[in-house]
Image: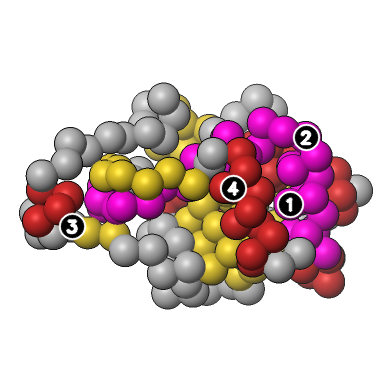
């Protein structure tokens, strides 16, 4: 699947938004990938999941872990495509944790899957949880790498889209964004 084909899925589903957005990282941007809109259609999920699974299959992961909420749908589909176990981490008191009786065996080969990565904070938290539980992080797979590869998580990284999307510090916005009300679309 080419980057243009993936972008077309986002355009067709209305998941590539234009305007003034506050990202989870706190940065501001003119573009926002609302992956949930693309991932509400199972044929799109299956295509994107198959494309990511094909990229990461050589890693030999036996478990996929995703940070909730964004990574859940695509993480589960990648695990299904690979025929491996799927677990997730979720927020508890503002911090990601492993709950619900999920266990990680010492040395277990684990793939982290996320929908969109800008600065990699949630993915890094997930990596830290896997390692704290004795697991081995084989790599990270994401649908959209908004950093165009600038984020280095210290493990092999795979994406379907790698773009350098402009992101701005809230104290240093360009004039057009200063004039446009900001929206934080994340989970709304």
Question: Can you identify the residue that label 2 sits on?
Answer: 42
Q: Earlier in the sequence, mark 4 or mark 1?
A: 4
Q: Earlier in the sequence, mark 1 or mark 2?
A: 2
Location of residue 168 in the rendering, given as x and y in whole percent from the top left corner? 22, 59
Quadrant of the frame with the N terminus = bottom right
Location of residue 118 in the rendering, given as x and y in whole percent from the top left corner? 41, 58
Question: Can you identify the residue that label 3 sits on?
Answer: 169
Q: Is residue 48 left or right of residue 164?
A: right
Mark 2 against mark 3, which lies toward the viewer?
2
What residue span does the magenta drawing correspond to? 25-54
Location of residue 119 in the rendering, given as x and y in whole percent from the top left corner? 38, 60
Q: Quadrant of residue 137?
A: bottom right
Quadrant of the frame with the C terminus = top left
Badge 1: residue crowd in 10 Å (few <14, some 14–19, many ≥20): many
Badge 3: residue crowd in 10 Å (few <14, some 14–19, many ≥20): few
Label annotation for residue 48: 1
Q: Is residue 173 left or right of residue 77?
A: left
Examine the structure image and report whether residue 129 is included in the region drawn in magenta: no
Q: Is residue 96 left or right of residue 104?
A: left
Mark 4 against mark 1, which lies toward the viewer?
4
Spatial CA span between label 2 and label 4: 13 Å
- Residue 59 appears anywhere in the view: yes
Label annotation for residue 30: none
Spatial CA span between label 4 and label 1: 11 Å
Q: Secondary structure at mark 4?
A: helix
Q: Secondary structure at mark 1?
A: helix
Q: Secondary structure at mark 2?
A: helix
Label annotation for residue 10: 4
Q: Secondary structure at mark 3?
A: loop
């Amino acid at each position: 699947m080419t980057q243009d084909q993936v972008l077309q899925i986002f355009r067709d589903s209305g998941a590539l938004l234009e305007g003034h957005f506050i990202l989870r990282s706190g940065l501001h941007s003119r573009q926002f990938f609302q992956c949930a809109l693309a991932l509400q259609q199972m044929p799109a999920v299956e295509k994107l999941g198959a494309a990511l699974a094909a990229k990461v299959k050589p890693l030999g992961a036996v478990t996929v872990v995703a940070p909730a909420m964004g990574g859940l749908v695509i993480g589960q589909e990648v695990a299904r495509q690979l025929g491996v176990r799927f677990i997730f981490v979720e927020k508890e008191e503002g911090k990601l944790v492993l709950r619900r009786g999920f266990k990680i065996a010492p040395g277990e080969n684990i793939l982290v899957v996320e929908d969109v990565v800008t600065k990699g904070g949630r993915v890094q938290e997930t990596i830290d949880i896997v390692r704290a539980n004795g697991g081995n992080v084989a790599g990270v797979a994401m649908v959209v790498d908004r950093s165009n590869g600038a984020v280095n998580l210290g493990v092999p990284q795979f994406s379907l889209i790698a773009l350098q999307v402009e992101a701005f510090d809230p104290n240093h916005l360009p004039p057009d964004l200063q004039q446009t009300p900001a929206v934080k679309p994340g989970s709304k």
